[in-house]
């Protein structure tokens, strides 16, 4: 396929097949990263840019799309995305373009449009810090057999400072 005619969808699918799903590459992605990038490409990038020729993608077209992802309900949860999530989408797109250049699917001398597309990388999330007295009060309220799991989660988060999703991903054997 000539460099000028490959679509964003074809290039992204080529990247998914030859990099994200191929564990024998020189620098394989971690399973979680590959899964996340595959999801972001197939859920957000391909539906939006599928038919556009990859060489026609322009940073000035991408930036308003990024803003729309943070202001319009989208994706499986039908909610606007956070800027850090949009930044992960941008990263997956950039990797797909680098892959396309390496495989000569698009011209190697072409600038990667993702390098010029701007994206906020700061979240509006603000961590709430609980004092030791507050943690003890919460643990005291949860100290009964019916809330043993919640008690353990509060203790885990208070003593390790794990993020919510990190703690919720653990299994009992991880804590033991």
Image (spheres, rainbow, N blue to C red):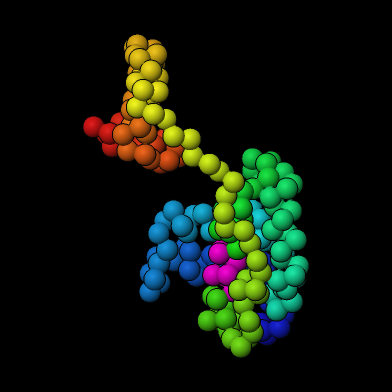
Name the quadrant of the C terminus. top left
Residue 30 locus on image (x, y percent): 40, 59
Residue 95 locus on image (x, y percent): 54, 70
Residue at x 71% of width, y 64% of height: 63
**Residues drawn in magenta:** 91-97
Q: Main secondary structure of the magenta part?
A: helix
Whether residue 29 is visible, yes or no, is: yes
Q: Is residue 69 left or right of residue 89?
A: right
Magenta includes 174?
no
Q: Is residue 36 left or right of residue 166?
A: right
Name the quadrant of the N terminus. bottom right
Residue 133 locus on image (x, y percent): 36, 22
Residue 152 locus on image (x, y percent): 33, 25
Q: Nearer the viewer, residue 39 or 94?
A: 94
Q: Nearer the viewer, residue 145 or 101?
A: 145
Whether residue 74 is visible, yes or no, is: no
């Amino acid at each position: 396929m000539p460099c000028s005619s490959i679509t964003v969808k074809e290039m992204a699918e080529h990247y998914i097949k030859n990099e994200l799903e191929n564990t024998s590459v020189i620098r394989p992605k971690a399973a979680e990263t590959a899964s996340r990038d595959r999801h972001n490409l197939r859920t957000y990038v391909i539906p939006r840019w599928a038919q556009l020729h990859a060489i026609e993608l322009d940073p000035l077209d991408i930036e308003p799309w990024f803003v729309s992802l943070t202001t319009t309900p989208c994706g499986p949860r039908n909610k606007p995305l956070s800027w850090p999530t949009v930044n992960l989408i941008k990263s997956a797109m950039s990797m797909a373009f680098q892959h396309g250049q390496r495989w000569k699917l698009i011209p190697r001398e072409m600038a990667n449009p993702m390098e010029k597309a701007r994206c906020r990388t700061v979240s509006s999330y603000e961590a709430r810090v609980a004092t030791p007295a507050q943690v003890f009060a919460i643990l005291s309220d949860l100290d009964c057999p019916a809330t043993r799991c919640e008690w353990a989660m509060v203790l885990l988060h208070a003593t390790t400072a794990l993020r919510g999703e990190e703690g919720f991903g653990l299994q009992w054997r991880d804590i033991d």
